[in-house]
Image (tube, helix red, strand yellow):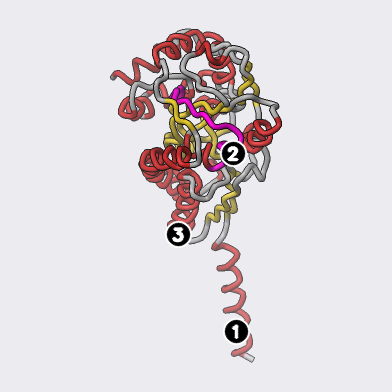
């Protein structure tokens, strides 16, 4: 009898251990679909490390291809308190705190070293704090997603070449303002819809990093990529402020520290694979246009910052100052 009681007690303890081993389950959403893209590799590595370091108390499942919905919808779910992580960007987050749009602006960063100073600045802490107060906590702030270029059916060497061109852009106030300023007709579409939109002629062109263009096989629909480099895009990984604040302090620390580590690794992976993707696209028959008049794009971009709704006057200059210090 004692043996049976002891066995039952051990079984109960074992069951409790299993139940407690996975205290928090999170789905981690991204628009990207190609498992070879650096961002998806980084997300999976992050999930594994958090799981190992937390002893299984946090289980993260990576969901690709907008399985949980378009990025805008997922971010709204995060803000409302859902147990999700979202791989998003500052253009998208600008819908909640307009000044964050600046961090996704055209030609805003002189180089990557300057971005390190920005993300360590008091200005960034203030902006991310405002976002957290809105319900969105930044877990990983600055993993390089890539340099964005334009894919179309003709070379785009200056803003004049975009006059009247319908181009897909992310759901981002700063990107809408930027391409409107170039004379194009910017159209917001989820990334998962871009291939069909190009194939059917709903849009004439799109823009994105080499890796995303290759991953989505957009080269099957358009054969010219112009290296405008109009945006250095950083991915920001976010969680619900409510959810994050409900976690024990040790788990909060794990999420943030592993976020800092993976940000550096993602940036390095992106830099290493950028040229490889460009060569892959060229080998598929895509023309890579390099003689782009970048100064004309920079000049045409300046007024875009003033057209973002509800943006703080002078915020662009504050960002530049933070990067110079």
Read off the magenta span. Answer: 215-231
Residue 315, compared with residue 58, is above or below; it is above
Which quadrant of the figure has residue 271?
top left
Which mark lies nearer to you, 1 or 3? Answer: 3
**What quarter of the picture does the N terminus occupy?**
bottom right
Tell which of 305 and 311 is nearer to you.
305
Q: Is 227 a magenta residue?
A: yes
Q: Which residue is mark 1?
A: 7
Quick one: label 2 or label 3, which is nearer the N terminus?
3
> Disc 2 and disc 3: Cα gap in Å?
40 Å
Badge 2 density bin: few <14, some 14–19, many ≥20, Cα 10 Å = some
Locate residue 68 relative to residue 32 in the image: left or right: right
Q: Is residue 115 above or below residue 49?
A: above
Give the CA distance from mark 1 to mark 2.
63 Å
Residue marked by disc 3: 52
Q: Position of residue 109 (x, y in %)?
A: 38, 22
Quickly name the residue at label 2. Answer: 220
Q: CA distance from mark 1 to mark 3?
A: 29 Å
Q: Residue furthest front?
A: 285
Residue 49, given in percent of the width and then of the height, sits at: 44, 55
First of labels 1, 3 by sequence position: 1
Give coordinates of residue 122: x percent, y percent: 38, 23
Examine the rendering and report whether any part of residue 274 can be seen: yes
Q: Quadrant of residue 310?
A: top right
Q: Nearer the viewer, residue 283 or 264?
A: 283
Q: Position of residue 3 (x, y in %)?
A: 59, 90
Q: Is 259 positioned to the left or the right of 220 in the image? A: left
Q: What label sits on residue 59 in the rendered view?
A: none
> What residue appears at the point 45 percent right and 37 percent down from the top-left corner?
282
Say what secondary structure mark 1 lies in: helix
Disc 1 or disc 2, which is closer to the eye?
A: 2
């Amino acid at each position: 009898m004692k043996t049976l009681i002891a066995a039952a007690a051990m079984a109960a303890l074992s069951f409790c251990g299993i139940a407690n081993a996975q205290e928090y389950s999170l789905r981690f959403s991204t628009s990207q679909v190609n498992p070879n893209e650096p961002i998806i590799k980084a997300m999976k590595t992050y999930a594994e490390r958090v799981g190992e370091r937390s002893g299984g108390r946090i289980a993260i499942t990576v969901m690709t291809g907008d399985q949980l919905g378009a990025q805008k919808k997922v971010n709204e779910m995060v803000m409302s308190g859902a147990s999700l992580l979202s791989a998003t960007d500052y253009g998208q987050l600008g819908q909640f705190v307009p000044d964050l749009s600046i961090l996704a602006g055209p030609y805003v960063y002189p180089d990557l070293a300057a971005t390190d100073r920005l993300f360590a600045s008091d200005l960034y802490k203030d902006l991310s704090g405002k976002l957290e107060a809105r319900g969105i906590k930044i877990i990983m702030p600055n993993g390089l997603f890539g340099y964005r270029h334009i894919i179309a059916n003709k070379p785009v060497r200056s803003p004049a070449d975009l006059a009247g061109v319908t181009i897909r852009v992310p759901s981002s106030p700063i990107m809408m303002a930027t391409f409107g300023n170039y004379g194009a007709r910017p159209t917001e579409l989820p990334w998962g819809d871009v291939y069909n939109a190009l194939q059917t002629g709903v849009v004439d062109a799109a823009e994105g990093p080499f890796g995303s263009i290759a991953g989505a096989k957009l080269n099957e629909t358009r054969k010219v990529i112009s290296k405008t480099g109009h945006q250095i895009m950083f991915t920001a990984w976010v969680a619900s402020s409510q959810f994050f604040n409900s976690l024990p302090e040790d788990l909060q620390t794990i999420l943030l520290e592993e976020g800092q580590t993976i940000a550096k690794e993602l940036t390095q992976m992106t830099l290493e694979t950028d040229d490889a993707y460009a060569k892959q696209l060229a080998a598929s028959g895509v023309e890579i246009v390099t003689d782009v008049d970048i100064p004309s794009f920079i000049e045409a971009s300046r007024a875009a910052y003033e057209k973002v709704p509800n943006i703080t006057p002078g915020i662009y200059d504050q960002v530049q100052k933070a990067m110079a210090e």
